[in-house]
Amino acid sequence: MTSITLSQFRARQSDYIAAAQREPVEITSRGVGRRAVVVSPEFFDRALQALEDQADIRAAAEARDESTARESHSEVMTEFGL
């Protein structure tokens, strides 16, 4: 990953945006450290999809967790007024 300062990014934005199409570009700032990371749209989409997949996997695991209390059929029917 390329690492540059904020002032370097400001001076050559188009160059660093082009570089981000190949690899992430980390933007740092004095006293603050990492401020931002510029990535390609494809990288961002893949990362977002991976996060959503992980959330789905966790939700499915929680749904399969049989240690939680279950409601009987009659309790569900009563809850919905059936």
Image (tube, rainbow, N blue to C red):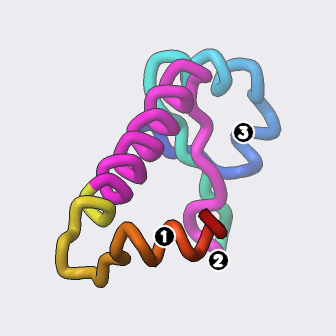
Quarter-of-image position of residue 34: bottom right
The majority secondary structure of the magenta stretch comes to helix
> What secondary structure is found at the residue carrying circle 2?
loop
Name the residue rendered at 64%, 77% in the picture.
Answer: 31
Name the residue rendered at 61%, 37% in the picture.
Answer: 38
Q: Write the start and end of the magenta stretch as one range.
A: 32-60
Q: Which mark is residue 76?
A: 1
Please determine whether, in this image, residue 81 is positioned above or below residue 64. Answer: below
Q: Are marks 2 and 3 in contact (CB under 8 Å)?
A: no
- Image coordinates of residue 15 in percent, x first then y, are 67, 19
- Nearer the observer: mark 1 or 2; the answer is 1
Q: Amino acid at mark 2?
A: Gly
Quarter-of-image position of residue 82: bottom right
What residue sits right under mark 3 in the picture? 9
Distance Cα–Cα, label 2 vs label 3: 17 Å
Is 75 positioned to the left or the right of 27 in the image?
Answer: left
> What secondary structure is found at the residue carrying circle 1?
helix
Is 70 positioned to the left or the right of 26 in the image?
Answer: left
Q: Amino acid at mark 1?
A: Val
Please determine whether, in this image, residue 19 is positioned above or below residue 34. Answer: above
